[in-house]
Image (cartoon, helix red, strand yellow):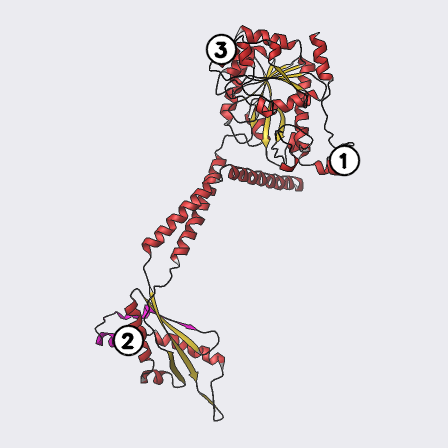
């Protein structure tokens, strides 16, 4: 019984933490919604305060209350408690109907007609700390009314009725009221915008929460296991390279010694899956694609090629995205509008003219060449078939970078040349239905989608890749075991053996 209760409590806590993480991730994605609503509702609050605000004017006078209490024939006025008590009594008296009627009668003699309740509502008193000073305040929407009521009160407090009701109290007018020339500052002009901003912030949070509740994007590895019809190969963490670790011309996303331990280990995990497919099924040509654009497939294919090259494998990356190519910029290759795949498929050059070598990372590349409008037709040509057949003899692995498979038909045209496809899924980016439809489209070409890569994850727990090792480099990496030996990651500088192996195969 205890174990069941403990398990339920732990499960509830984990679900709450997961929900909170999803909410903060959704907030980071749609931060502009609460910001815009907060700003907009603040403006609405200010306009509402401006429209509904009525100007008020205050006239004040200062009174002193002196008590005379005989003790053994000696008069005293030093009892503070009695001063406060008489002050409260005076507050009730000055706002009574009797005083209001006297003020009204006095004003009528001066041709100013006001109702009794209006006079009572306009009067307030404030005691000055623990002293015997009282500030009498009259506030109305008309500066003349405020002054006239306060002036009439100053005359009333000295009348005999006051002494009859308070025989032991003497009220003196210290400062007579002055005519108010400035309107009172309005609290509404601060309160309404503040309330509006809080309301806007709350509405923004509600919208984000609802979007998270009804979102069909892949937000966790559990979503892949339960909602995506492909196996999870690896979870790649979001990598934000610190500027001080970057060298001029380096991509922030390619694996280097400055990369986080978890980032490198995630790609090693992906490499293991690919090598297992090679050994068990003989797969060596892989199509790396995504359902929609900007999911990071070019980065994934580049880093997969790098970690394969670190195992002394000859790897060729073919940039088949002849619409929005990225590999040349990603590897910082020199030249502009250099000869590439589109030139080769049009018969404008030879195979050896398009293969470029990155000695730094130990991989070979075929860039896309100039952008074309008939990319799908070129990829589905005899020239492409002959190119792939020639490359298959020269390289251990051929990785094809394609445009988004759900957006254009280029990926479907390439399926005939590859052994299998790997789908890149960016966290909280693409609708799950679109992802599954993309998988079905590829499988309809009689090519298996052997797995998927969960890319740019931002979380602290899970199963594979980033979630498996977390930011555990302090435990498993640099700080404890050092960067050159032990379990800590030692960057594997690509050797020339992969290039020599490729040359020997060409011979």
Q: Position of residue 308 (x, y in %)?
A: 68, 20
For disc 1, the neighbor class at 10 Å (few under 14, some 14 to 19, many from 20) is some
Residue depicted at x 67% and y 36%: 471
Q: Which label was assigned to residue 377? A: 3
Disc 3 element: helix
- Identify the residue position indicated by label 1 in the image: 482
Disc 1 element: loop
Magenta residues?
101-128
Observer-nearest residue: 323 or 91? 323
Q: Nearer the viewer, mark 3 or mark 2?
A: 3
Q: Position of residue 210 (x, y in %)?
A: 47, 38
- Identify the residue position indicated by label 2 in the image: 103
Q: Tell me if I can see residue 405 in this picture.
A: yes
Q: Nearer the viewer, mark 1 or mark 2?
A: 1
Pointers 1 and 3 in contact (C-beta within 8 Å): no
305 sits left or right of 84 in the view: right
Q: Earlier in the sequence, mark 1 or mark 3?
A: 3
100 sits left or right of 470 in the view: left
Mark-to-mark CA distance, 3 and 2: 97 Å
Observer-nearest residue: 454 or 339? 339
Q: Earlier in the sequence, mark 1 or mark 2?
A: 2
Q: Position of residue 251 (x, y in %)?
A: 61, 29
In the displayed orientation, state which residue is furthest to the front: 335
Residue depicted at x 32% and y 71%: 179
Residue depicted at x 28% and y 75%: 103
Q: Earlier in the sequence, mark 3 or mark 2?
A: 2
Mark-to-mark CA distance, 1 and 2: 89 Å
Above or below, comparing residue 351 to residue 465 in the picture: above
Observer-nearest residue: 253 or 58? 253
Pointers 1 and 2 in contact (C-beta within 8 Å): no
For disc 2, the neighbor class at 10 Å (few under 14, some 14 to 19, many from 20) is many
Q: Tell me if I can see residue 445 in this picture.
A: no
């Amino acid at each position: 019984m205890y174990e069941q209760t403990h398990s339920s409590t732990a499960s509830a806590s984990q679900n709450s933490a997961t929900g909170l993480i999803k909410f903060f991730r959704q907030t980071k994605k749609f931060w502009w919604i609460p910001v815009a609503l907060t700003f907009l509702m603040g403006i609405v609050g200010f306009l509402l305060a401006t429209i509904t605000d009525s100007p008020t004017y205050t006239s004040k006078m200062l009174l002193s209350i002196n008590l005379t209490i005989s003790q053994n024939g000696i008069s005293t006025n030093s009892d503070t408690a009695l001063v406060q008590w008489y002050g409260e009594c005076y507050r009730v008296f000055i706002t009574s109907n009797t005083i209001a009627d006297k003020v009204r009668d006095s004003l009528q003699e001066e041709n100013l007609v006001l109702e009794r309740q209006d006079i009572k509502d306009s009067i307030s008193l404030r005691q000055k700390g623990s002293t015997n000073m009282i500030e009498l305040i009259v506030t109305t929407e008309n500066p003349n009314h405020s002054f006239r009521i306060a002036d009439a009160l100053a005359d009333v407090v000295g009348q005999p009725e006051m002494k009859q009701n308070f025989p032991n109290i003497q009220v003196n007018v210290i400062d007579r009221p002055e005519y108010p020339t400035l309107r009172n500052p309005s609290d509404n002009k601060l309160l309404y915008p503040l309330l509006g901003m809080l309301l806007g912030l709350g509405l923004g949070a509600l919208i984000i929460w609802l979007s998270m509740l009804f979102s069909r994007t892949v937000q966790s590895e559990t979503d892949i296991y339960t909602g995506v019809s492909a196996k999870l190969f690896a979870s790649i963490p979001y990598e934000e390279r610190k500027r001080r670790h970057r060298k001029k011309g380096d991509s922030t996303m390619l694996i280097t010694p400055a990369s986080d331990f978890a980032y490198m280990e995630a790609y090693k995990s992906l490499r293991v899956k690919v090598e297992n497919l090679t050994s068990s099924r003989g797969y060596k040509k892989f199509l790396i694609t995504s359902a929609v654009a900007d999911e990071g497939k070019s980065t994934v294919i580049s880093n997969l090629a790098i970690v394969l090259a670190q195992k002394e494998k000859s790897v060729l990356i073919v940039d088949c995205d002849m619409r929005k190519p990225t590999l040349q910029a990603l590897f910082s290759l020199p030249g502009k509008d250099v000869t590439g795949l589109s030139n080769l498929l049009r018969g404008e050059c030879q195979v050896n003219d398009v293969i470029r070598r990155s000695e730094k990372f130990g991989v070979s590349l075929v860039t896309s060449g100039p952008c074309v409008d008939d990319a799908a037709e070129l990829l589905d040509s005899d020239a492409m078939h002959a190119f792939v057949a020639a490359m298959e003899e020269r390289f251990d692995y051929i990785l094809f970078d394609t445009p988004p498979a759900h957006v254009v038909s280029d990926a479907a045209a390439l399926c005939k040349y590859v052994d299998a496809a790997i789908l890149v899924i960016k966290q909280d980016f693409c609708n799950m239905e679109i992802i599954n439809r993309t998988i079905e489209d590829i499988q309809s070409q009689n090519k298996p989608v052997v797995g998927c890569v969960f890319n740019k994850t931002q979380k602290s727990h899970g199963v594979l890749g980033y979630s498996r090792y977390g930011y555990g480099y302090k435990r498993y990496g640099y700080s404890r075991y050092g960067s050159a030996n032990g379990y800590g990651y030692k960057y594997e500088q690509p050797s020339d053996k992969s290039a020599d192996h490729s040359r020997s195969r060409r011979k």
